[in-house]
Image (cartoon, coloured by chain):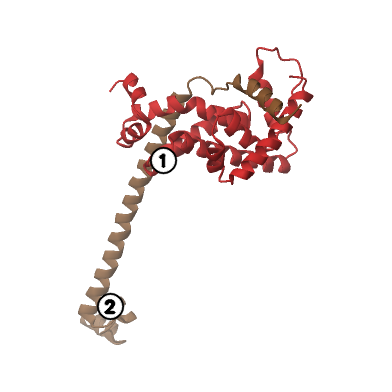
Chain colours: A brown, B red
Amino acid sequence: MNKSDIKDELSDILSSYNPTFTEGFTERVIQSVGVEDIEEETEIAFYNIFRWVALSGVAAIIMLLFTVYLTEGTFSEDAFYGLMYYTPDEPVITSLNF
Amino acid sequence: MKKEDLKTINDINLVNDALTGNMAAFEAIVSKYEPMVAKIIIPMLGNSYDADDIGQETFIRFYKSMEKFKGESQLSTYLARIAINLSLNEIKKRTKQRTLSSDDEYNYNMPNGDTDESKDITDMVNSSLKVLDPKFRSVIVLRYIQGFSTRETAGILSLPEGTVLSRLSRGQIKLKEIITKLNRI
């Protein structure tokens, strides 16, 4: 049997070959797409919330740094803790005043 | 717009409608191309629940990447590329699972001769194709079962046309041998 005969014979068989998906395939696809859409929308909503929370956090930190620098004139550790003008005697003086 | 009207609209317009959120247009695309996608995935994977899942995945992937479809290639070729790639990935996954597990679930079984003639050609072709190496199977499926041209088949599989022709030639001989072994011809 030559190649052409094989090809013809296979073509005969394959022309009758007609596989199909199970019933209701289209409906299941549409349903799945709907679920995917909802999941995607939820994901986008969470991402947007996270982005706004993160941006607010960054803005608050920048404002804090700006305020500290304006009031104390430095970014030292003491400036952040509010201990720039603190002296070791201060608790004693405070107690005496009380 | 009625469903009947959607069937007469050409593919690019259907895609554009679907992109605006018209689910009826997307449904029309799925209905129109479901038989074509089935004729790629089922001979590649066999008639199983997996085949249905991969079919669904094909359309979901298309839905997600629909805006990339500009109509430069035919929608059938575009969907065929997604379907064949997902099928080949699934075959790779099954092969990996088969080597990791002693479970016989994924072993290919040569069909015995107890099915009646009417039940049939579809089962017989599915069973015969399962035995064929995936690289020959994909070419036979696209070229003979789906009816794509050699050039289209080469484009879908990202292979040179010469490779497609040689795989086709060797694949058809191997497939014929398998079918003959099964005494089906």
Q: Which residue is mark 1?
A: B64
Q: Quadrant of residue A3?
A: top right
Chain under callout 2: A
Query: In the image, is B123 to the left or to the right of B148?
Result: right
Instruction: Tell me the amino acid under the disc marked 1.
Output: Lys
Q: Which of the two marks, 1 or 2, is nearer to us in this view?
A: 1
Q: Height in image: B108 above or below A53?
A: above
Q: Secondary structure at mark 2?
A: loop
Chain under callout 1: B
Instruction: Tell me the amino acid under the disc marked 2.
Output: Gly
Q: Where does the C terminus of chain B fall, quadrant-wise?
A: top right
Q: Secondary structure at mark 1?
A: helix
Residue B108's x, y, as percent? Answer: 72, 31
Residue B7's x, y, as percent? Answer: 36, 23
Neighbourhood count class around disc 2 (C-alpha, 10 Å): few under 14, some 14–19, many 20 upward: few
Neighbourhood count class around disc 1 (C-alpha, 10 Å): few under 14, some 14–19, many 20 upward: few
Q: Nearer the viewer, residue A22 or A60?
A: A22
Which residue occupies 29% across, 80% down? A79
Label ID, residue A82: 2
Q: Quadrant of residue A32?
A: top left
Q: Height in image: A44 above or below A65?
A: above
Q: Height in image: A63 above or below B179?
A: below
Which residue occupies 32% across, 55% down? A51
Label ID, residue A67: none
Does residue A98 show up? no
**Mark 1 vs 2: CB contact within 8 A:** no
Q: How many marks?
A: 2
Which residue occupies 50% across, 25% down? B35
Residue A90's x, y, as percent? Answer: 27, 84
Q: Quadrant of residue A27?
A: top left
